[in-house]
Image (spheres, rainbow, N blue to C red):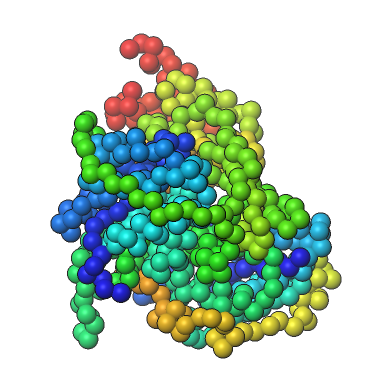
Amino acid sequence: MNLEEYKGVYVFAQQVDNVLNSIAFELIGKGKDLADALGTEVTAVLVGSDVKGLADELAEYGADKVIVVDDPELKEYRTEPYAHALASVINKYKPEIFLVGATAIGRDLGPRVSARIHTGLTADCTQLEIGDFPINPIPGKEQKHNQLLMTRPAFGGNTIATIACPDFRPQMATVRPGVMQKRAKVAGAKAVVEEFNPGFTPDNKYVEILKVVKAVSDTVDIMDAKILVSGGRGVGSAENFKILDDLAAVLGATVSCSRAVVDAGWKPKDLQVGQTGKTVRPNVYFAIGISGAIQHLAGMEESDIIIAINKDESAPIFDVADYGIVGDLNKIVPALTEKLRLELAAK
Amino acid sequence: MKIVVCIKQVPDTKGGVKFNPDGTLDRAAMMTIMNPDDKAGLEAALRLKDQYGAEVTVITMGLPKAEDVLREAMAMGADKGILVTDRVLGGADTWATSQTLAGAIRNLEYDLIITGRQAIDGDTAQVGPQISEHLGIPVISYAQKIEIDGDSVIVERQFDDRYHVLKAKMPCLITALAELNPPRYMTPGGIFDAFDAELTVWGRANLVDVEDSNLGLKGSPTQIAKASDKVRKGQGEKINKDVTESVDYIVGKLKDRHII
């Protein structure tokens, strides 16, 4: 493999139902930082059916170039045709870096593509930068420059590791949604758009979609909420989430929850914060009746202000809370709602 | 029907993680368990066995002591256990791990391969899809329900805001979510039998169609630049007062920080 041949930062612009996922813009934003450090450009790879119209939006968020792979076989996400699309783009264009969102799609697609083209893949990264590998010179070992250094949590968020992929290209990473910053949208910005179709011939690896069942949800995406009122097992029942709903209503906040609540069937999965749920960083995060398992903390500890209410004084949630209140949530939460109602009415 | 289930012995991260003085993980001081997603995958395989009749083979790659999870799986009802262990396989990333497991699985007949979605130590979710790629079979990740229909498998595949009902011709690889099925307990008879059961132990020489250059630390494209214990945000204030004072305290803080 001639590593010098590989140039440019590429990102997978994930879309579903012809709507771009926020992760596409986040990857372009981080991709621009990396491309600036390398003196190169960011190319978004848009895969789907009738998706060409989305290219302008990618340009407005900073993509210099958009490669569109458009084919009826790509209408709904399926592993094989999407993997074929990305692997073909990589073989033809030879990017030095390729980023994919660590979504339910990207975490299936990324490994399949990296295995097909034989390169390394670092999962669920929370930090990416350009630097040297090894980080400090080691006598007798070549120190390579301009490497992608990929940082990720492991062991349930207990450790962080920085990974490099010095001898294979592209350097591939899946990136945790909600962590990287989008760039400000520049209305009317244009990118070079190139269409590429490697041909799609169904084989044994193509699966058939019998049904698409969308979750019916009228709630705000918890990753976009400014204030989250989050409940855990301590709330006690699905019915008792009413007191959290009331608090959220007064503050214009959104209700979210811990994994225990989803496992108990009290709330749907799309409201779950944590390692196996979503990563959130609202201005205020209320952790109510949440003990604070390490997997939960991994999904919310970057919040600006964390307010925890828990009857167990030794709950680990208090280790990350800015303001911790030891007490009975069944008494404190309704009283807090009432007080806030009065305060806000007086304004 | 023949089902192969890939399982991994992992440190129990719920009980907290212990470190050596040099910052590396002190695995010896930590309890080990069968990875939860893998256990759900095993349970799914055992339910298919109950329903349709199947031979369930569990396979793990690891240190010799990983045979514990094979015996646990057999006590739950798996028929055969295979341990893949060899010094040259150590230090593998997901590429080298998936090459190893694919090389071992090539010795076996299978209709279905089931892996957990991800292991709680690495949290990568990569090995299952990578095995399927090396074997040239379809993958269905994030399975929340599995049924058999003739020579095909019908799976509910979870996404963030929806699920797809997918049909794939077997052989096929499925990655299971911990939510898939609550795992059954080991039976007392099963524990006795599993303790005595003969396990198959394979090393490098038993792997089929795998180059040395794709194995172990040397065959791993990704390399660790540094690793460290995570630095957490420091603890803030904590109060333990009556309801009125608690409420006043929170409202005061929300005002101080210009939230209200």
Q: Is residue B132 left or right of residue B113?
A: left
Q: Is residue A61 left or right of residue B137?
A: left
Q: Position of residue A261 (x, y in %)?
A: 59, 40
Q: Is residue B178 above or below residue A115?
A: above
Q: Is residue B64 left or right of residue A303?
A: right
Q: Position of residue B223 (x, y in %)?
A: 35, 72
* Figure disc tally: 0
Q: Residue furthest top?
A: A346
Which quadrant of the figure has residue A284?
A: top left
Q: Is residue B257 left or right of residue A296?
A: left
- Give the residue drawn at x 49%, y 31%: A255
Q: Nearer the viewer, residue B110 or A164?
A: B110
Q: Is residue A154 above or below residue A223?
A: below
Residue B149 makes an appearance in the image: yes
Q: Nearer the viewer, residue A152 or B54?
A: B54
Q: Position of residue B231 (x, y in %)?
A: 34, 57
Which quadrant of the figure has residue B40?
A: bottom right
Which quadrant of the figure has residue B196?
A: bottom right
- Give the residue drawn at x 48%, y 53%: A200
Quadrant occupied by the N terminus of chain A: bottom left
- Give the residue drawn at x 57%, y 82%: B208
Quadrant occupied by the C terminus of chain A: top left
Q: Nearer the viewer, residue B6 or A305?
A: B6
Q: Is residue B69 above or below residue A106?
A: below
Q: Position of residue A102 (x, y in %)?
A: 43, 51
- Give the residue drawn at x 44%, y 78%: B214
Q: Residue furthest left?
A: A39
Residue B239 makes an appearance in the image: no
